[in-house]
Amino acid sequence: MSDQVVSLGGKKRSTFIDKVKELLPEGGNLSLCLTCGACSSGCPATGLDGMDPRKFLRMAALGMDEEIEKSDWPWMCTMCQRCIYVCPMKIDIPQLVFNARALRPREQRPKGILGSCDLALKNPSTSAMGATPEDFAFVVEDVLEEYREAQPEFADMQAPIDKQGAEFFVNQNSREPVTEPDELVPLWKVLHLAGVDWTYGSHGWAGENYCMFLADNDAWEHITRTTANQADKLGCKIFLNTE
Ligand code: SF4
Ligand code: SF4
């Protein structure tokens, strides 16, 4: 049981819940909640900051906008969607959480997520580390050459960037080329041994999208379009998202 005390004042006018009701499927009637607790029991964020999804939902339904805005719990939700799968009423709590995040002014959102989103907007790589397309190409070529030489059984292995007409467009966690370049290789080996025709994109090679977690819709769309447009431009048939 959580030890957080929630005090209920008089009924407040909630703008949050009105907005969310328009966005949630079928009018987002939060009163459908049976308070069964199935969402809370499977949620990895239950107990953090004294909160769980059922309690969060109840606060939203009660119009406690201020408390929701101040709570750090929405930032601890992983958006895993387990709560939706187990909810008998199919209440979309992650959507509610996403909109709760947007209640905070952008500059007051958690620094780590904010910084990663801003770095991803800096150049066409969409890398949360701010690595440029040139940096990425340099690392990929360097690591590939090293492994080809050190492991003759992989002497023909490829790690193409912007290969026109490749079947698979593959993206990549943006930390690996910067902090752990050797971690790039296992996936290359799998693709090589499976005989997959694949490519990275010089634009949009970075797979994660922190702007989504930041609840910045415009930036989220920009990142997604950058990578999808590159896959289209190269004529790839399959988008393999590794993140
Ligand atoms: S989406 Fe969020 S609230 Fe739902 S189970 Fe996952 S972490 Fe919990
Ligand atoms: S699982 Fe659904 S119905 Fe049950 S408490 Fe959670 S939101 Fe309410």
Image: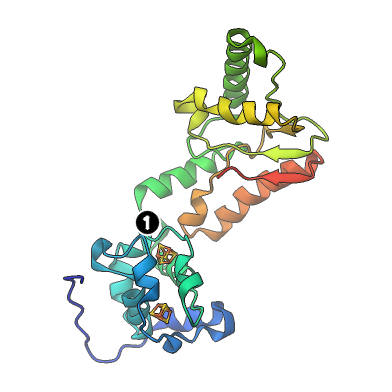
Q: Quadrant of ligand 2?
A: bottom left
Picture layout, residue 195 above or below residue 220: above
Picture layout, residue 66 above or below residue 159: below
Q: Nearer the viewer, residue 51 or 100?
A: 51
Rendered location of residue 10, percent (x, y): 24, 91
Rendered location of residue 75, percent (x, y): 37, 59
25 vs 109, left or right, is right
Write the residue at 60% across / 48% down: 223
Q: Disc 1 on helix, strand or loop?
A: loop
Picture layout, residue 213 above or below residue 131: below
Residue placed farthest to the bottom in the image? 10
Write the residue at 49% across / 49% down: 210
Instruction: Locate residue 137: give its quadrant.
Output: top right
Which residue type does callout 1 highlight? Answer: Arg
Write the residue at 38% across / 84% down: 61
Q: Nearer the viewer, residue 26 or 123?
A: 26
Q: Nearer the viewer, residue 219 or 148?
A: 148
Rendered location of residue 160, percent (x, y): 71, 26
Q: Which residue is identified by label 1?
A: 109
Q: Residues within 10 Å of mark 1 (few under 14, many from 20)?
A: some
Picture layout, residue 164 above or below residue 231: above
Rendered location of residue 91, percent (x, y): 48, 78
